[in-house]
Image (spheres, grey):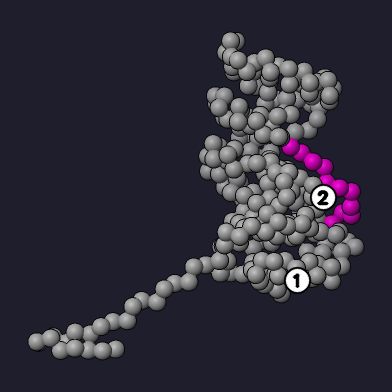
């Protein structure tokens, strides 16, 4: 560290502060009917259904899951840990080692975000406009993993309940524009009850409601037919899902 005398003072040149290395980011985009995608530091990686399911389970269990726990969650009582370990090896390869083992969990220095968790936070904060904007559809709609089915239903039903409880028509309009809300007879009836008689949208909303009644029976029009945003878990053993940690 060089020092240079300047009169009564000694001028010392301090080293430049070390630059902090940016933390790696991982963004999970698992809502909607499209392929699940993970974005790592801006690089998109299209994932298989199974790998997206594993990453979802890790996201809701930040303390991690063992190979046996993951195998049980995904494959039921017949799950084999070696199958999970093979999948985890592939996940770590495509995501540049963002997942550690023993137990399996995201690296603590990794900044993880997920669209389904973002919608949950926005609903809880009462920010329905942002939640509806973020909600592009159900969580991994083709997944039959029990924990994910329960999370999917909880997310969609919490958003739906908030929309139906909100005053006005703006949130209802946005809800029925989603794939889930488009077939929600209760939401459509509520919106029709709030719209002025001369509103231009009344005709197509009434037509959609008649279509739902014809397709799913008259009970759907009264809110008792086809369940909206609720999927029944696939048949399996009585094993309960691993609780969120």
User: Are the residues flagged by discs 2 and 1 in contact, CB closer than 8 Å?
Assistant: no
Q: Position of residue 96 (x, y in %)?
A: 65, 70
Residue that extends furthest to the top in the rendered view of this protein: 198
Callout 1 secondary element: helix
Q: Which residue is rendered at x = 70% and y = 29% of the image?
A: 182
| Residue 231 is covered by the magenta coloring | yes
Vertical side of 176 occupied by 200: above or below? above
Looking at the rendering, the stretch of residues picked out in magenta corresponds to: 229-239
Q: Nearer the viewer, residue 62 or 28?
A: 28
Upstream in sequence: badge 2 or badge 1: 1
Residue 28, given in percent of the width and then of the height, sits at 64, 55
Which image quadrant for residue 166? top right
What's the residue at 83%, 20% (across, down)? 214
Total residue callouts: 2
Q: Which residue is at the far front?
A: 43
> Above or below — where is 58 with respect to 167?
below
Can the viewer see residue 193 in this picture? Answer: no
Q: Which residue does the image show at 87% across and 67% down from the upper left? A: 80
Q: Quadrant of the C terminus?
A: bottom right
Q: Where residue 82 appears, x then y in whole percent? A: 84, 71
> Does residue 147 show up magenta in the picture?
no
Residue 89: give its label. 1
Determine whether, in the image, residue 206 is placed left or right of residue 5.
right
| Residue nearest the observer in this picture, 80 or 28 | 28
Residue neighbourhood size for the residue with mark 2, other residues' Cα within 10 Å, grouped as few (<14), some (14–19), many (≥20): some
Of tags 2 and 1, the one toward the viewer is 1
User: For the point 68% across and 50% down, which residue is it?
Assistant: 30
Q: Label 2, on which residue?
A: 144
Q: Secondary structure at mark 2?
A: loop
């Amino acid at each position: 560290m060089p020092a240079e005398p300047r009169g009564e003072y000694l001028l010392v040149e301090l080293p430049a502060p070390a630059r902090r290395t940016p933390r790696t980011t991982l963004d999970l985009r698992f809502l909607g009917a499209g392929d699940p995608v993970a974005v790592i530091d801006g690089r998109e990686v299209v994932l298989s259904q199974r790998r997206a399911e594993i990453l979802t389970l890790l996201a809701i269990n930040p303390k991690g899951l063992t190979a046996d726990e993951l195998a049980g969650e995904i494959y039921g009582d017949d799950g084999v840990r070696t199958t999970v370990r093979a999948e985890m090896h592939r996940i770590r390869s495509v995501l540049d080692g963002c997942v550690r083992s023993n137990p399996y969990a995201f690296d603590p220095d990794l900044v993880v975000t997920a669209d389904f968790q973002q919608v949950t936070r926005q609903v809880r904060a009462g920010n329905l406009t942002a939640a509806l904007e973020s909600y592009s559809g159900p969580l991994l709609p083709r997944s039959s993993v029990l924990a994910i089915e329960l999370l999917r239903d909880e997310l969609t039903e919490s958003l739906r309940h908030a929309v139906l409880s909100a005053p006005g028509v703006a949130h209802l309009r946005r809800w029925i524009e989603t794939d889930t809300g488009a077939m929600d007879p209760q939401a459509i009836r509520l919106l029709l009850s709030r719209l002025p008689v001369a509103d231009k949208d009344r005709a197509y909303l009434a037509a959609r409601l008649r279509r739902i009644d014809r397709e799913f029976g008259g009970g759907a029009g009264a809110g008792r037919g086809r369940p909206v945003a609720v999927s029944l878990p696939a048949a399996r053993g009585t094993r309960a899902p691993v609780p969120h940690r």
